[in-house]
Image: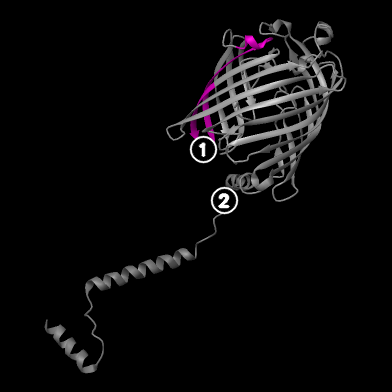
Amino acid sequence: MRTFAISLAAALLLGGPLSPPATAQSTEEDSRAAIVERSQADKSTKLKPYVPTGFEMAVTRVEKTLLNGPMKWHPFLEGAYTGAGFSPGVGYVTHLSPYSTLDVRGNVSIRNYKVAEAEFVSPRLFHRRAELSVVGGWREATQVGFYGIGPNSSTANRADFAFEQPYAGARIKLKPTRRLWVVGGGADVARWSFNDPTGSAPSVDSVYTPATLPGLGITTTFVHSQATVGFDWRPAQAYARRGGFYSITAHDYTDNDSRFGFRRLDYRVTQHFPILRESWVFSLNGQASATFTKDGQQVPYYLLPYLGGGSNLRGYSSHRFRDRDSLLVQGEWRIMVNRFMDTAVFYDAGKVASRHSEMNFHDLRTDYGFGARFHTPFATALRIDVARSTEGTRLVFATSSAF
């Protein structure tokens, strides 16, 4: 107390600020500050910029290319025709405007199917309410399976056909309300010319005749036009965990010599039911196709509706069943593993028939299985399914969603 009084008197007499007497605590704080300063100064002499590993650099490069910037060279794995098998290929994208692109691509499958094509896409027409696609190219299929017409065909009766096809066409899709209404249409021209198949099965020419199989061995050019109307409230067409798609599509096929012209109607209902904040999704799909012949004409065998393959009856061979009409129902229970992978358990059932009145739920062909989907938020990059049917187990690799 006496020391404080003396200090106060000295401060008042000298006119200086009052300074508290030094204590042990302030001395300790000063020493700590000095230690921190020395430590920081020592670290500053040893700091070096972080050098990412080779793996980190590769991941960053892929992320920038795929997600944050335009990718010019890209893999192209879509087969020339259903049943092509694994089809490694490459494409090159050129931007003709900020949003319009030209994609030149091609591949060759393990079964020697080939495709080379170029596609122009303009996705933001009419204030983002329309998308235009123009495509042209050439494809070859070397061993397309044909098991006969009707629901009771047998695998023992398989025959193969092969064809080459130059083609060109245009499609436009309109969304008047952006998310709900869908209106689409387009037309294409394709020339079907047939070759000798390369598979182990006999050629269709050795099993059938033009009298028993319409369109056999005849080179034909078709003009195909179509129009679609429907409702679509899925977040994206190529990958969705909620929403639905309901549509009707009308097709018209006109050939160059008026022998194989026909019309076809396709119906589709797809609905996704999310559960537990989309951790689970129950997805249902139904499709039906019906053909109608023009006066005095026939439906060629290679353009009949079919079931079997990686996107419909997955437990059966591609094009396993063919006839005038077809019916398909599918269900999947999809479970999210992480942001980029789902697993799924599925069930497929379907049939073909020669008359509309036979399109019912009796005597359906069925399969079941499980699989994995690797995807981005808006597209499916790879789908792997293992499907089991009465005709065996099949492994499916695809670069698109089943529905």
**How far is the residue under mark 1 from the one under mark 2?**
24 Å
Q: Position of residue 38 (x, y in %)?
A: 40, 68
Q: Quadrant of residue 114?
A: top right
* Callout 2: SS: loop
Give above or below for 6 relative to 80: below
Identify which residue, 364 or 376, lies in the foreground: 364
Q: Quadrant of residue 7?
A: bottom left
Identify which residue, 307 or 139, lies in the foreground: 307
Q: Is residue 304 visible?
A: no
Residue 52, label in figure: 2
Residue 45 shown left or right of residue 310 in the figure: left
Q: Position of residue 226 (x, y in %)?
A: 73, 28
Give the magenta range: 331-359
Give above or below for 323 relative to 124: above
Q: Where the C terminus falls, by quadrant?
A: top right
339 falls in the magenta region? yes
Amino acid at circle 2: Pro
Amino acid at circle 1: Arg
Question: Of all residues shown, which one is farthest toward the front?
Answer: 295
**Mark 2 Cα shell of 10 Å, populated few (<14), some (14-19), many (≥20):** few
Q: Position of residue 170 (x, y in %)?
A: 76, 35
354 falls in the magenta region? yes
Q: Most prominent secondary structure in the magenta stretch?
A: strand
Residue 175 shown left or right of residue 113 in the figure: left
Seen at 73% across and 16% down, the residue is 292
* Callout 1: SS: loop
Q: How many marks?
A: 2
Residue 36 shown left or right of residue 379 in the figure: left
Q: Position of residue 18 (x, y in %)?
A: 23, 85
Seen at 73% across and 25% down, the residue is 251
Q: Which residue is mark 1?
A: 339
